[in-house]
Amino acid sequence: MTAATATPLAGLDEQRRTWTEQAWATVDRERLRELIIGLVDIASPTGDETPLAQHITETFTASGIEAHTMDLDDRQANSWARLRGDGSGPDLMLYAPIDTVTSGNSEEDVPWAAETLRPDMTARADSEGDYVIGLGASNPKGHAACVMAAIEAVHAAGIPLTGDLIAGFGAGGMPTNPRPGVGNPRRNTGQGVGCSFLLEQGVWADFALIAKPGWTVSWEEVGLAWFEVTVHGTHTYVGSRHRLPYRNPVALAGEVAVRLERWFPQYSQAHRSGLVLPQGMVANIRGGCERTASFTPAQVRMMVDLRLSPRTTPTAAKRELVDAVRRIATELDARIDVEQILSIPGESSDERMWLCRSAVAAWEAAEGQPHRAVHDASGATDANILRSRGIPTIRVGMPKVVDAPFEVDFAMGMNAVDLAEAEKLTRYLIRVAVDTATRTLEEVGTG
């Protein structure tokens, strides 16, 4: 069987095939467009997701679906919904984060994210044929819309569930600390804080599927560790450069960054395993006094993101970075300190567990060919939070837009969604949900 002759219902028994078809019959591309536009038009930068969470809750409630807004504080909130089963089967959570790392506000985003904000970088949706374009239209909001549409379809079809089907929409899913200058006193506004809080407050499941980019079934992904690297030098005055000891830490930090960038590929290859190829990079360099160009700082700091294989602990990665920095310090005859400032381990689920088998079967039915696992992943998501809490989790999503009538760079890949792919993912989520939340606990191995 090829993709041209694929039968997306292959592998389902007659009853579940019928239920899935009934739910699929309610999936409407224009409804997906409406859902995506509704999400994009509400700005939700990390730390300020409450208006969007309320919108999601209200959308579900208007469809007769039980839904709740869960406040983390007065600016940050999750949304979640539940279709209740009879209690005899497994609970499944379909999950998507809802925050964007940029704000859509030029005062915040320029110049670090762009020289000027293009229309796709703002929280205002534009619909062009089968594409919706706007801040986060694909990642994460298009994926959140697919979860919403799948829940609406299962509800509309009236499928008798044995387990609960839960939709979770988490704040703070982006790898970021608080945005500067916006007044949120909490440091932990990103890094999966909403997902963690959702689970702590009792919104739990036997299995979870997180909808994030990548048309493949993934059962593991990298974690991340952040480090602050401090390069020491000499504080002095430009007029005395030729008379006093001179070691400019700004120039020295540049040398350190270059050498680290040469080391990261070695680290990546050393930790290639399973589905992951962990990466690393220097993200920023900070130092000096902005009110003068006449004095060197005594030190310059830089931040490093080092991705972690599920088989590498944060402390093991720290030791490797420290060793690399020591070698660089010796080469440059410099004093360089390393401090670990963030640790989120990579996590893995058993690829033989029920949800992974069901998800792979659904992928193969949709594509008409054996599943192709991606083996060079280095992106981290809230799946690590779900797995670390003990919920077997897989990740499946839409492919990024590439063949489009407009230029696609990194930002546009986040900000443009193909409605045909959104419809395909929604149908996929429905099939996996029906195949799981209508089973007995014994059938899925949790009894």
Image (cartoon, rainbow, N blue to C red):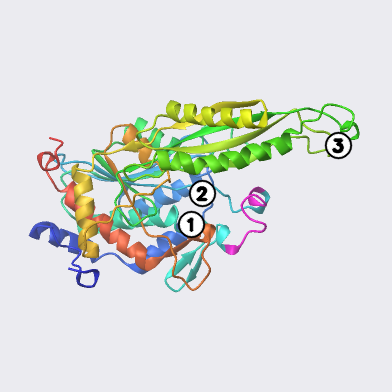
**Residue 294 - label:** 3
Seen in the picture, residue 139 relative to 4 is either above or below; the reply is above
195 or 51, which lies in front? 195
Q: Is residue 95 left or right of residue 21?
A: right
Q: Nearer the viewer, residue 284 or 390?
A: 284
Position in image of residue 205 (x %, y %)? 26, 38
User: Which label's residue is closer to the chain start, 3 or 2?
Assistant: 2
Q: Which mark is residue 414?
A: 1
- Res 242 quadrant in image: top right
Residue underneath mark 2:
100
What residue do we see at 53% from left, 57% from top? 411
* Residue at disc 3, secondary structure: loop
Marking on residue 6: none
**Which region is colored magenta?**
108-119
- Quarter of the image for residue 423 reads bottom left
Locate residue 244, reporting x and y percent: 86, 27
Q: Type of residue at label 1?
A: Met
Front residue of this view, candidates 125 and 263: 263
Q: Is residue 238 left or right of residue 111?
A: right
Residue 419 visible in this rendered orientation of the protein: yes
Q: Is residue 172 visible?
A: no
